Structure formats: structure tokens, C-alpha cells
Image (cartoon, rainbow, N blue to C red):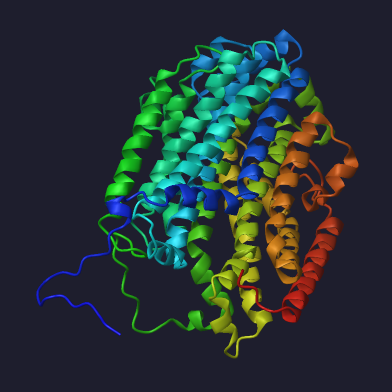
């Protein structure tokens, strides 16, 4: 056995990779990433496409009369509504296309950005964190191959989404929704996705942890949305030009069909991606540019408990969702004072509000908005409840369970944080909604009413966590199916009220059994039954986990 040696004082050089090609192996990694995401990406793209087409098609009923569209446009011309939707220029046209673009682009651009960020961090930072990147890089693979492959997959996903949106919207045959506007509409979403994918390429270089990289990129999305909202609600809209979301909205699909704002997104995406490649050369594999903080020499007593340890792992996500839902509630609350004027004349929405039985338009509208807030809270609950699965597949659960820690206590700690944290973010959402709603309407009594309305959905969140733990306990590889619960709740609970879905569809969702406060009266019976169902599901899931082997795949 022989070994190579280097002279003292010289630096050992790495083995050459494919003739010095830093992108060697990129094509293979792209195919591998597409195979890994063969379910995840179609679900993302299909959900975004279906949500857009369903919303656009619902306009046939909502705004069947030109006067309905004129009323909708007039009602949207207020600072609060412009902050929620987009720039005022869309209101110069009352066609279906301009209404769709005004109401949807700002919201769906955030979701497309979320998809793009998760794609990039999943195939870059997550690969390094688990050690797979180092193993792959030991073969004939260039140092930039992982990042190039991740960005390529994100680009491909966004282009497919853009084309499907353009084809789908054109195929609906709505008046004023033409092929040229649909192309701009579709590629506006792709442009936003490319910018945030490139942002994730930069944030992935700074931290050694996937959640930190994703969290930083998602914070950029939040700042971009806030700048856009502040700019559109103000006078000259200058702040909106600091936001990629503001750029894509100013392409004005179906109104002006401008392509040049999308070029700004392309330039920004190229610049950020180039920065990501450069920064990746300034760190080691598995490390981040930001040095790790030294831990305390002694651990707190809470870390020795399952709940305390789980809370430490979840605290970043819990803080982010809490702050986000508080601000989201405040934004919706700011338009409560204008709800009656905003919805006046739109017969279908007025009928949907009337079916809720509220004493006023404000109460009925607030009960519909509460569904949106609780669905976002359910997203946190699903992510937190599935964290044990991530710990299991990463191999971190086995050393813990090899000690005196029981399986039930370990999973129970994560569940306690998921269910308790979900209740906390609901409280913050109701608080933001109530404070802003009371200020916009001048009715201080709305604050306790809206906080109580939010907390009424806590048992439904607990059922959602119970579904996740049942899947984790008995069918761990099918755990992602838990996402069906919040998605179904939004489609049936929010869109179903407007489109008048059959009542039995609403009964299939745990959120459908919660009294629609403040429009309806409080009924404790369904809340107690949901709590019992949640307890039964948790027991069933824990029983399944105790009976199966750990699954590292």
C-alpha cells in the first residue's frame, strides 16, 4: 500500500474534476432532482394552476353582468384594498383579465416564490446538511453542479407553470382573456419565481442549515410583498419598484401587456444566481459563510425535556408564522371598515355572506376571512407535526430513542409544540385582525369577537395534527398526504362558500364543523367533538409508531 505525500509547507490540491469543469455532472443531478421531485413539483404546479383557473372561471358567475364588474372595480379603489391586491392602473379596465391580474398576481407570486425557494434549498443546502453532497462531490462532479442543477429544476418548473397558465387561461374563453395577455400573465409568475429561486441560491451560502436558508429567503419574499403593498397603497408607488412582486404586477397583463418589467426580474435573477455561485467558492462543503455561534457551556433545563427540545427546534418557524399571521390579520382587518362598500352590488358574494347568517356585512366578511387565516395556521401545524419524520429519515431520532426517552414522549413533544404553537399563531392572527378591524370600523367590540373567532378553530387544527401523526405512525412514507387537509379546507371553506359547493363536501373537513364566528352563534358541541377526534387520532398515531421500526428512507 502506497501513499502520496506533499512537501512541507505546500498545499495539497484537490483532484481535478473532469478537466477542471466546475459544472461536470450537472445534467445527471438535474435528472436525479427531477426524479426526487416527481410528485412534489406536479402537486405544486397543479395546485397553482387549478387555483388560478378555478378563480378565473368563477368570475363568470361573480361578475356575469358588466355592472358587477364595474362595482368590483370601484370598490377596489381604496388604499387598503390596493395594498391587498395591486396597483391602481388595473382599475382603468373592468375586463375579466384585468380583475384577475389585479386580485391574483400579488398573491400567487408569493406562492410561486415559496415553491422556487424550497426547490433550491432542497437540492443544495439540504443535500449538504445530510452529507449526500459531500459523497457525490467525491466523484466526478463539479463544485457548482449542485447549485446549477437546483436552479435548472426551478427554472424548468417555473417555465412549465407559465406555459400551463397561459394555455389554461386562454382555453377558458373568458371575455377579455386573450392569448397575448395570458402569456404575459403566465410569464409574470415565472419571472417572480426565478428571482426568488436566485435569492435562495444566495441565502443557501450563508447558513449551514436548510431551515435557516429557507427562512432567510422567505423573509425576502415577505419584505418584497410588504414593499409592494406599501407602494401600491401610497401615492406614487415608488416603493413598489423596489420589489420583484411590484415589477411583475406592472407588466399589466390584459391591460398593457408590458414585457420589459419582466426583464428587470431576469436581470435580478441572473445577478443573484451569479452571486450565489461566487459565494459558494468562499466556503467549505457543509459549512456556511456565517460562522456558527458558540453554544452555552451549560444547557438549559428545558432542553432536557421532550417539549423543550422540540420547542428549540421549532422556534424559528413558530416565530415566523406568528409574525406573518399577525401582519396578515392586520392587513385584512384594515379593510373591514370598507367591506360593505367594497362588496356592494356583487350579488354572488352578497348571497354567500347572507348564507352565513351574520348580523352585518362586516361580521359575515370577517368570518370568511377567518377561514383563510386558519388555513395558513394549519400549514404551520402540518409542517410542525411532520418534523418527527424529518428527524427520523435524517438519522437523528435513533440516537435519542436509544436512551431512556420513549417513542411516545419524543413524538409527543413535537405534537405539543405543533398543537400549542398552532393555537398561539391563531391567537396572534385574531389579535392582528381584531386590532386593525376595530380601528378601521371604530367598533372596539370587534377585538374580543375576532380573537374568539380565531381560537374557535383550534380544535380543527388539533385534528389536522392528528391526521399528520396517524400518517407518520402507520404510513410514514405517505406523510405528505397530510397537506390535503389545509388545501381541501381552503377550497371548500372559502371558494366553496362563493361557488355554493354541496354541504356534504364542507362536512368532510374538520374546519367545516367550526361555527363561523362572529357571524354565527357559538356552539360548544362540535368543538368538543373535534377535540375528542383529535385525541383519538393522536392516540392512534402514537400506537402505530410504537409498533413499527424506524424508517431511514
Q: Name the side, left or right, on which 248 lies relative to 467.
A: left
Instruction: Tell me: residue 280, above or below residue 255.
Output: below
Residue most toward the left? 9
Where is residue 225 shown, x and y percent of the image? 46, 36
Which residue: 50% across, 64% down? Answer: 315
Report if residue 167 is visible in the image. Answer: yes
Report if residue 334 is visible in the image. Answer: no
Residue most toward the front? 1
Q: Name the side, left or right, on which 458 lies relative to 394.
A: right
Where is residue 521 shown, x and y percent of the image? 82, 46
Q: Nearer the viewer, residue 19 or 184?
A: 19
Instruction: Tell me: residue 391, above or below residue 18.
Output: below
The C terminus lies in which quarter of the figure?
Answer: bottom right
Q: Tell me how many marks there are.
A: 0
Where is residue 534 shown, x and y percent of the image? 78, 65
Residue most toward the bottom? 404
Where is residue 544 shown, x and y percent of the image? 77, 75
Q: Name the side, left or right, on which 24 lies relative to 100.
A: left
Which residue: 71% across, 46% down? Answer: 487
Residue 9 figure quarter: bottom left
Q: Nearer the viewer, residue 425 or 166?
A: 166
Q: Nearer the viewer, residue 84 or 434?
A: 84
The N terminus lies in which quarter of the figure?
Answer: bottom left
Which residue: 74% across, 39% down? Answer: 491
Which residue: 60% across, 38% down? Answer: 437
Residue 519 figure quarter: top right
Amino acid at each position: 500500500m502506497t501513499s502520496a505525500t506533499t512537501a512541507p509547507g505546500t498545499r495539497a490540491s484537490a483532484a481535478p474534476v473532469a478537466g477542471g469543469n466546475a459544472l461536470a455532472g450537472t445534467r445527471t443531478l438535474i435528472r436525479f432532482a427531477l426524479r426526487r421531485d416527481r410528485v412534489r413539483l406536479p402537486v405544486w404546479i397543479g395546485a397553482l394552476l387549478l387555483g388560478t383557473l378555478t378563480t378565473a372561471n368563477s368570475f363568470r358567475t361573480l361578475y356575469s353582468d358588466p355592472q358587477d364588474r364595474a362595482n368590483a372595480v370601484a370598490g377596489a379603489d381604496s388604499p387598503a384594498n390596493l395594498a391587498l391586491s395591486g396597483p391602481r392602473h388595473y382599475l382603468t379596465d373592468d375586463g375579466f383579465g384585468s380583475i384577475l391580474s389585479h386580485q391574483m398576481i400579488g398573491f400567487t407570486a408569493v406562492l410561486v416564490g415559496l415553491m422556487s425557494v424550497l426547490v433550491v434549498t432542497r437540492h443544495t443546502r439540504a443535500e449538504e446538511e445530510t452529507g449526500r453532497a459531500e459523497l457525490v462531490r467525491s466523484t466526478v462532479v463539479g463544485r457548482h453542479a449542485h447549485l446549477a442543477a437546483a436552479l435548472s429544476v426551478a427554472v424548468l418548473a417555473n417555465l412549465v407553470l407559465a406555459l400551463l397558465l397561459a394555455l389554461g387561461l386562454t382555453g377558458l374563453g373568458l371575455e377579455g382573456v386573450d392569448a397575448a395577455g395570458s402569456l404575459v400573465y403566465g410569464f409574470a409568475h415565472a419571472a417572480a419565481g426565478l428571482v426568488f429561486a436566485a435569492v435562495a441560491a444566495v441565502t443557501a451560502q450563508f447558513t449551514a442549515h436548510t431551515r435557516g436558508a429557507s427562512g432567510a429567503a422567505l423573509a425576502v419574499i415577505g419584505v418584497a410583498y410588504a414593499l409592494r403593498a406599501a407602494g401600491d397603497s401610497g401615492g406614487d408607488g415608488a416603493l413598489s419598484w423596489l420589489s420583484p412582486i411590484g415589477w411583475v404586477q406592472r407588466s399589466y397583463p390584459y391591460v398593457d401587456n408590458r414585457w420589459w418589467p419582466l426583464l428587470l426580474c431576469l436581470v435580478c435573477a441572473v445577478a443573484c444566481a451569479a452571486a450565489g455561485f461566487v459565494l459558494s467558492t468562499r466556503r467549505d462543503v457543509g459549512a456556511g459563510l456565517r460562522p456558527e455561534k458558540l453554544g452555552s457551556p451549560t444547557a438549559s433545563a428545558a432542553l432536557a425535556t421532550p417539549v423543550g427540545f422540540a420547542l428549540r427546534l421549532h422556534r424559528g418557524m413558530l416565530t415566523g408564522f406568528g409574525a406573518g399571521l399577525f401582519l396578515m390579520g392586520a392587513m385584512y382587518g384594515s379593510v373591514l371598515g370598507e367591506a360593505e362598500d367594497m362588496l356592494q352590488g356583487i350579488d354572488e358574494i352578497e348571497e354567500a355572506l347572507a348564507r352565513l347568517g351574520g348580523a352585518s356585512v362586516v361580521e359575515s366578511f370577517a368570518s370568511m376571512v377567518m377561514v383563510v387565516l386558519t388555513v395558513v395556521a394549519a400549514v404551520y401545524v402540518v409542517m410542525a407535526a411532520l418534523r418527527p419524520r424529518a428527524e427520523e429519515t435524517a438519522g437523528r431520532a435513533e440516537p435519542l430513542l436509544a436512551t431512556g426517552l420513549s417513542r411516545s414522549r419524543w413524538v409527543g413533544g413535537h405534537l405539543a409544540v405543533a398543537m400549542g404553537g398552532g393555537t398561539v399563531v391563531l391567537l396572534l392572527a385574531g389579535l392582528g385582525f381584531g386590532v386593525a378591524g376595530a380601528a378601521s370600523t371604530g367598533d372596539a367590540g370587534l377585538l374580543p369577537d375576532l380573537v374568539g373567532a380565531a381560537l374557535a378553530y383550534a380544535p380543527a387544527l388539533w385534528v389536522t395534527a392528528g391526521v399528520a401523526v396517524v400518517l407518520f405512525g402507520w404510513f410514514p412514507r405517505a406523510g405528505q398526504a397530510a397537506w390535503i387537509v389545509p388545501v381541501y379546507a381552503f377550497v371548500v371553506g372559502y371558494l366553496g362558500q362563493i361557488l355554493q359547493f354541496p354541504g356534504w363536501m364542507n362536512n368532510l373537513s374538520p374546519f367545516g364543523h367550526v361555527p363561523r364566528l362572529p357571524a354565527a352563534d357559538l356552539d360548544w358541541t362540535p368543538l368538543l367533538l373535534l377535540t375528542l377526534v383529535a385525541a383519538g387520532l393522536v392516540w392512534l398515531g402514537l400506537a402505530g409508531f410504537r409498533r413499527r421500526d424506524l424508517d431511514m428512507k
